[in-house]
Image (spheres, grey):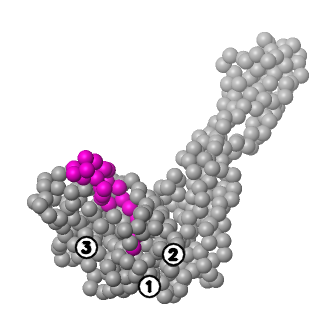
């Protein structure tokens, strides 16, 4: 383990383990008894590259003397636990949120862990909120809480551990798990960028789950309804498309663009107020965004019905940005080459009626064609 560098980062490394015994790098806090509150850490590690024989314990609390038994809370652990050559098993590396208090009891009673797939994100941020009878875990891609939410886990009930003399641990070590070869593990390194803890004694904001109103169609406006937060809370917004933050989409409303078509959107509302812990809530996703409907009025024709005169198609006011094309018709048959906004009547038009078709196209919208009324017969 290195000392903090100029940025305050701490690096854990293991190198050339023999495989004869568990081997690793670890450090823990000298403080005991953090208790209820919000725990957060940002680490540099592509866990998709983690070797199966290596366990990365990304911040956990542990107090062997806590009641009702051994109490461990894992903010996020990545490993291939459970496999091993001795058992003829080969397990993939997964990440996990969870806790256990009595390993003699089955999962869900003595221990409770939710696993999820690893990611190749080079930086991960983990957050855990520990409350009486409730643990809420979140893992985000990138630094901070504005990246893609990879997993949120909520564990509740009487088995949630009680605060005792728990300490904060980070560890990187070798086991025989995963079905690999612990005697030939290549060097592994994890960099811990930061760790923070906010005690639960800090006032908590009233923070309801936001909702989204509006039609999920290109061109329509979605509106985030944050609900009723603590009086005086400053709210900020971030819209997401399929879990990825949309650049610049930080208003309470979102006009759906062509890029949104076929995707679902959510909005994340963050509330802040002096003396209170900052809170973030995310809405449920919308339905998949469908193509927009163009404003498409019926065109009209102006001009004198006489051979040699010019008729003009008046398309009306379409949705802004719509591209319009024209086709003129003689008694219902398309006139070859007559695709401009204006059409000069020729002798072939005599004794026939004229009409025009206007077609509108715009990215993200359904193409629409509108026909004018037919004229009287050309004399």
- Across and down, in percent, residue 345 comes to 78, 19
Looking at marks 3 and 2 on the same chain, the residue that comes earlier in the sequence is marked by: 3
Q: Which residue is drawn at the image coordinates 40% and 76% (left, top)? A: 39
Q: Position of residue 329 (x, y in %)?
A: 76, 20
Considering the numbered disc 3 on the image, is that residue within a helix, a strand or a loop?
loop
How packed is label 3: few (under 14 Cα within 10 Å), some, or many (20 or more)? some
Side of 294 relative to 78 (left or right)? right
Magenta segment, which residues? 78-101
Q: Residue furthest front?
A: 104
Residue receiving disc 2: 158
Asked if residue 166 is among those painted magenta in the image, a careful observer would answer: no
Q: Quadrant for the N terminus, please.
A: bottom left
User: In which quadrant is the C terminus drawn?
Assistant: top right
Q: Nearer the viewer, mark 1 or mark 2?
A: 2
* Disc 1 packing (10 Å; few <14; some 14–19; many ≥20): some
Pair 1/3: label in front? 1
Instruction: Report the residue marked by disc 3.
Output: 9
Q: CA distance from mark 1 to mark 2?
A: 21 Å
Q: Which residue is under mark 1? A: 199
Q: Gap between marks 1 and 3, in whole Å?
A: 23 Å
* Label whose residue precedes the other's in the sequence (1 or 2): 2
């Amino acid at each position: 383990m290195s000392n903090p560098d100029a940025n305050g980062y701490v690096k854990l490394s293991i190198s050339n383990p023999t495989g004869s015994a568990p081997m690793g790098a670890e450090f823990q806090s000298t403080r005991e008894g953090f208790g209820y509150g919000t725990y957060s850490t940002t680490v540099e590690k592509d866990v998709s590259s983690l070797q199966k024989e290596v366990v990365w314990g990304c911040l956990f609390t542990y107090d062997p003397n806590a009641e009702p038994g051994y109490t461990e809370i894992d903010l996020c652990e990545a490993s291939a636990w459970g496999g091993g050559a001795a058992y003829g098993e080969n397990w993939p590396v997964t990440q996990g949120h969870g806790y256990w208090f009595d390993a003699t009891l089955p999962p869900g009673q003595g221990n409770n862990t939710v696993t999820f797939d690893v990611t190749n994100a080079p930086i991960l941020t983990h957050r855990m909120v520990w409350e009486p009878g409730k643990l809420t875990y979140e893992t985000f891609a990138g630094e901070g809480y504005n990246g893609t939410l990879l997993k949120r886990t909520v564990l509740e009930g009487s088995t949630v551990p009680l605060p005792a003399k728990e300490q904060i641990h980070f560890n990187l070590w070798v086991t025989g798990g995963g079905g690999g070869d612990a005697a030939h593990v290549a060097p592994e390194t994890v960099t811990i960028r930061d760790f923070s803890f906010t005690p639960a004694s800090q006032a908590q904001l009233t923070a309801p789950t936001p909702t989204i109103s509006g039609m999920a169609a290109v061109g329509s406006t979605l509106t985030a309804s944050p609900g009723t937060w603590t009086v005086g809370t400053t709210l900020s917004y971030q819209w997401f498309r399929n879990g990825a933050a949309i650049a610049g989409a930080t208003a309470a409303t979102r006009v759906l663009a062509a890029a949104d078509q076929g995707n679902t959107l959510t909005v994340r509302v963050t509330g802040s107020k002096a003396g209170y812990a900052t809170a973030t809530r995310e809405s449920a996703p919308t339905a998949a965004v469908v193509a927009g409907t163009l404003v498409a009025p019926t065109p009209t024709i102006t001009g004198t019905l006489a051979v040699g005169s010019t008729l003009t198609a008046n398309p009306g006011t379409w949705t802004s940005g719509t591209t319009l094309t024209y086709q003129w018709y003689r008694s219902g048959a398309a006139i070859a080459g007559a695709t401009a906004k204006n059409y000069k009547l020729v002798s072939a038009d005599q004794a026939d009626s004229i009409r025009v078709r206007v077609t509108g196209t715009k990215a993200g919208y359904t193409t629409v064609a509108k026909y004018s009324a037919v004229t009287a017969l050309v004399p």
